Amino acid sequence: MSTDIIVDLMHEAVGVTIKLGAPMLVLSMAVGVIVALFQAVTQIHEQTIGFVLKLVVIVGVLMLGGGWMLTTLQDYLKQIFMTFAL
Protein backbone atom coordinates (compact mmCIF):
# COMPACT_ATOMS: atom_id res chain seq x y z
CA MET A 1 0.00 0.00 0.00
CA SER A 2 1.43 3.31 -1.03
CA THR A 3 1.36 6.54 0.89
CA ASP A 4 -0.74 8.12 -1.88
CA ILE A 5 -3.65 5.83 -1.06
CA ILE A 6 -3.38 6.56 2.65
CA VAL A 7 -3.20 10.31 2.04
CA ASP A 8 -6.28 10.12 -0.20
CA LEU A 9 -8.19 8.13 2.43
CA MET A 10 -7.26 10.59 5.17
CA HIS A 11 -8.23 13.53 2.95
CA GLU A 12 -11.62 11.96 2.31
CA ALA A 13 -11.98 11.19 6.04
CA VAL A 14 -11.56 14.87 6.86
CA GLY A 15 -14.07 15.76 4.14
CA VAL A 16 -16.63 13.27 5.45
CA THR A 17 -16.12 14.50 9.00
CA ILE A 18 -16.72 18.10 7.96
CA LYS A 19 -19.72 17.11 5.85
CA LEU A 20 -21.32 15.23 8.75
CA GLY A 21 -20.49 17.69 11.51
CA ALA A 22 -21.14 20.96 9.73
CA PRO A 23 -24.96 20.98 9.86
CA MET A 24 -25.06 20.46 13.62
CA LEU A 25 -22.28 22.93 14.32
CA VAL A 26 -23.61 25.69 12.06
CA LEU A 27 -27.19 25.42 13.32
CA SER A 28 -26.18 25.25 16.98
CA MET A 29 -23.93 28.26 16.47
CA ALA A 30 -26.78 30.18 14.83
CA VAL A 31 -29.11 29.29 17.70
CA GLY A 32 -26.45 30.39 20.18
CA VAL A 33 -26.10 33.78 18.48
CA ILE A 34 -29.87 34.29 18.34
CA VAL A 35 -30.27 33.33 22.00
CA ALA A 36 -27.38 35.60 22.97
CA LEU A 37 -28.98 38.51 21.14
CA PHE A 38 -32.33 37.78 22.77
CA GLN A 39 -30.73 37.59 26.19
CA ALA A 40 -28.84 40.83 25.62
CA VAL A 41 -31.99 42.65 24.56
CA THR A 42 -34.19 41.32 27.38
CA GLN A 43 -31.43 41.16 30.00
CA ILE A 44 -32.40 37.59 30.86
CA HIS A 45 -29.14 35.77 31.50
CA GLU A 46 -30.23 32.19 32.05
CA GLN A 47 -27.72 29.66 30.75
CA THR A 48 -30.18 26.80 30.43
CA ILE A 49 -32.17 28.58 27.71
CA GLY A 50 -29.29 28.45 25.26
CA PHE A 51 -28.30 24.93 26.25
CA VAL A 52 -31.79 23.48 25.87
CA LEU A 53 -32.41 25.18 22.53
CA LYS A 54 -29.06 24.00 21.15
CA LEU A 55 -29.81 20.48 22.37
CA VAL A 56 -33.22 20.52 20.68
CA VAL A 57 -31.68 21.75 17.41
CA ILE A 58 -28.96 19.10 17.45
CA VAL A 59 -31.44 16.31 18.18
CA GLY A 60 -33.68 17.63 15.39
CA VAL A 61 -30.80 17.66 12.92
CA LEU A 62 -29.86 14.12 13.93
CA MET A 63 -33.44 12.94 13.50
CA LEU A 64 -33.86 14.60 10.11
CA GLY A 65 -30.40 13.91 8.70
CA GLY A 66 -29.45 10.75 10.55
CA GLY A 67 -30.25 8.49 7.60
CA TRP A 68 -28.17 10.58 5.25
CA MET A 69 -25.31 10.65 7.77
CA LEU A 70 -25.42 6.88 8.18
CA THR A 71 -25.48 6.34 4.41
CA THR A 72 -22.51 8.68 3.97
CA LEU A 73 -20.50 6.80 6.62
CA GLN A 74 -21.43 3.45 5.11
CA ASP A 75 -20.31 4.56 1.65
CA TYR A 76 -17.00 5.79 3.03
CA LEU A 77 -16.40 2.57 4.96
CA LYS A 78 -17.23 0.49 1.88
CA GLN A 79 -14.67 2.54 -0.03
CA ILE A 80 -12.06 1.89 2.67
CA PHE A 81 -12.72 -1.85 2.69
CA MET A 82 -12.61 -2.02 -1.11
CA THR A 83 -9.27 -0.17 -1.06
CA PHE A 84 -7.76 -2.57 1.45
CA ALA A 85 -9.21 -5.64 -0.28
CA LEU A 86 -7.20 -4.86 -3.39
Image (cartoon, rainbow, N blue to C red):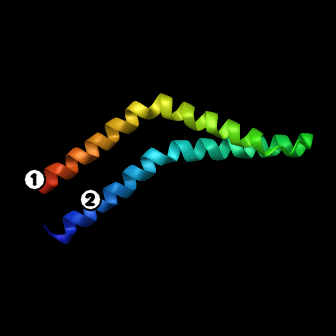
Q: Which of 17 and 54 is in front in this view?
A: 54
Check the image and name the residue furthest to the front: 48
Tell me if 80 is positioned left or right of 71 in this view. Answer: left
64 left or right, relative to 6? right
Q: Residue 85 carries which label?
A: 1
Q: Horizontal and vertical percent for residue 24?
A: 54, 42
* 49 left or right, relative to 55: right
Quadrant in which the N terminus is drawn: bottom left
Amino acid of disc 2: Leu
- Residue projecting furthest to the top: 64
Mark 1 → mark 2, Cα distance in angstroms? 14 Å
- Name the N-terminal-most of marks 1 and 2: 2
Residue 74, disc? none
Task: Quadrant for residue 15, please give it.
Answer: bottom left
Q: Which mark is residue 9?
A: 2
Q: Residue furthest right?
A: 43
Q: Where is residue 51 in the image (x, y as percent from the top left)?
A: 70, 42
The amino acid type, in three-letter code, at marker 1 is Ala
Kindly state the secondary structure of the residue where label 1 is placed: helix
The nearer-to-camera label among 1 and 2 is 1
Q: What element carries label 2?
A: helix
Which residue reaches farthest left?
Answer: 86
> Looking at the image, which residue is at 20% across and 71% down?
3
Up-down relation of residue 34 to residue 4 (above or below): above
Q: Which quarter of the figure is the C terminus placed in?
A: bottom left
Provide residue 19's location: percent of width, then percent of height.
Answer: 43, 47
